[in-house]
Image (tube, rainbow, N blue to C red):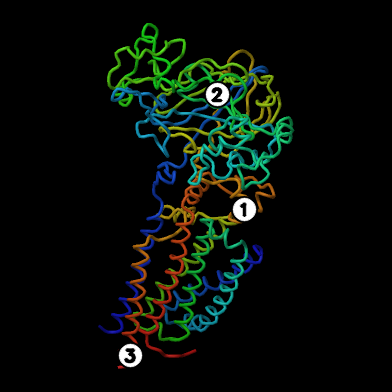
Amino acid sequence: MNRETGLLAATGIFGAALALSWFTQGTGVVRDDPAKQIAIPKQLTAPLQVKAAYNGSDIFFRYRWPSPNPGIFHDVLKFEGGKWVVRGSAVPGSQPDGLHEDRVSMMVDDGSVPDFGRYGGYVTVGRRLAGFTDEVSGKEVAAHPYLGGKLKLDEPTKYLPSTRKSLENWADLAPEDEQKALRAAGYFLDLWHWRANRSNPIGLADDQHVAEGRLSDSGKSPYATNWDGGKQQPRFMFDSAKAGRAALRWEDIIAGKIGQDDTYFLRVDQAKPFDPNAGWIEGDTLPRRSLAMSDGSRGDIKVAGKSRWDNGFWDVTLQRKMDTGNPTDDKIFRDRGVYQAAFAIHRQATGGRWHMVTLPVSLGLGRQAELEAVRFNGETPNWEQPWRTVTLFYPGQVNWALLNSTKHAGAAQVKAGVPVKHRHSEAQLANYGIEVEFNYAIRRQWLFTMFGGVLLIAAFGIALNMLSSRKRSA
Amino acid sequence: MAAYHVVLVHFPMALWMTAALAILIRAFSSSALALSIDRALTPLLFLGFLSGAAAFAVGLMVWPWEAVSSSPLGRNHALLAAWTLAYWTLMMITRWLHGEAVWHGLMRFVMAGLALIGAGLLGITGTLGGHLIGVYTDVSEVLRRLGWEVYRTFYLPDTTLIALAAATVLLLAIGWWGRKSQAA
């Protein structure tokens, strides 16, 4: 081998190392890990189309988003081996049997939570929420005197930052009189929560809000758990005279044979008390949730018309009184008012934090805004206005404390009130959300990569110089 | 320090890009013009090294290390900047040690290839810096189409790192062999 051959070999090795680096970069770290509550969706962004309209007494929101199939089932009770077992409990990512309902939700503010208009749902995400790798246990929350004792929360939910004394500590709540004062000042987010299984069949969306936690408005819930713990059996079964059957069949559910027009839900007015001697056979299945009309503030949001899945898309319209008379858990809409809204969907049998969210948009009632609610006369809008398309993205495990910490290069901008969309796109945020879930492992590989690359360049330089003839000149 | 970094980076970018052009011209021409340009190459590379090292050092002070090492774009910018500085330092040392000999035989084409890679590294580093201040070009879209999403950290799996280590050792061995054969 002569020196020219050596030069060629060195150049080839250097080039091959660069090519290998290019083609293998970004691999080997990011992978699903259910033990750490990690499940990365294959698609990181999706479109959501929205329209809004109002007639002076009611406000309507219409949502349309892609979903490969209608997720109309939630958890169920399956008769298996002589007893009733729960199937379809939440898991990280998609529930393998497809048993988690599709949802669309919307958080709304009237300017009382200023950071919400700039950062959207990020302001509600504290450290160690449900579904995070380091989540607080439900027992810890239930044992908390205020969150568990008074608010009856049993999992670490969203909350607004000023309800805590510190961004770092989910349990360090501001005093109760401070909470009351904040609430009276409008420091909460209204949460509209349409559920394909637990609210849609009775023509409702769940009316909730976010303040010290994710809380339900006062009044009766549209759903209850269909389980009698004492007797270890369901509370209700279908009334076959009204529903056409006593139970569903597991194989029909899994095969997708039960559609939107079938009885896939258990309304208490179509049900009767469970009879353990009704001749149950292996595979008989009952919904784990029973449905009944809400009352009070919780029942404020109705489904307008019929919410339907068709040809790969959900089309859902919700309707609510502009002024519900409940100003401490609903945002009151006024003609010519400007509000802030952020949206989220669950699809493909996901629950909890495995949703896709949007950045906040301004909402104007007869005012110029990113989403303009159009005034109309009559009972129902004609929806002639064009859709407003917003981008949904997977948010990962990014939390508000992190965004305000020295780990976030933009923390100073957050403190200065620079809106997130001024610096980040949804695609960028989705990718960042994934990186945060693997932060330590990725940082380690990145450091090795940086130093490995510098050493490779140095070695190539040494080889190049040793292989070349030295001949100094000007 | 961000404003100082932004000011400083223009110097190595201009100097190294000019150096890349000078190398390409000299690699493919021995005209009087090419020879004149080549005479300016070592000073260009030296000034590029000084200003590049200064920009790199100031760049590390823009954000706390914790922030840079936690941000995908911060990581990528730091990684590419480190590689670019190392790479152009290699070019400077090579040209300085070997003088006009780098334009003889196969070496001139190696220099031309290295200049193109160096310009590419510099361009990517600059693009990533632009992303960090919210002003960027479509270079990132080109990189995306070539397989690298710039909003994800550029890191290598363990197997590739091992291959890189092996390549490093192999390159040193080839260099050692070259020195030995030169001495013989």
Chain to which mark 2 belongs: A
Q: Hey, what amino acid is under mark 1?
A: Ser
Q: Which of the pair A173/A344 is nearer the observer?
A: A173
Q: Give me the disc on residue A405.
A: 1
- Which residue was labeled with disc 2? A206
- Tag 3 near tag 2, CB within 8 Å: no
From the viewer's perspective, is A22 left or right of A354?
A: left
Look at label 3 and name its amino acid. Answer: Gln
Indicate the chain on which mark 1 is placed. Answer: A
Q: Secondary structure at mark 3?
A: helix
Where residue A456 sits: x, y (%)? 40, 72
Whether residue B48 is situated above or below residue B135 in the rendered picture? below
Q: Quadrant location of residue B24?
A: bottom left
> Marks 1 and 3, how far apart in space?
57 Å
Secondary structure category for the residue under label 2: strand
Residue at the location (52% across, 78% down)?
Answer: B45
Q: Quadrant of residue A205?
A: top right
- A341 relative position to A3: left or right: right
Numbered tag placed on residue B182 in the rendering:
3
Q: Which amino acid lies under the numbered mark 2 shown in the image of this protein? A: Asp
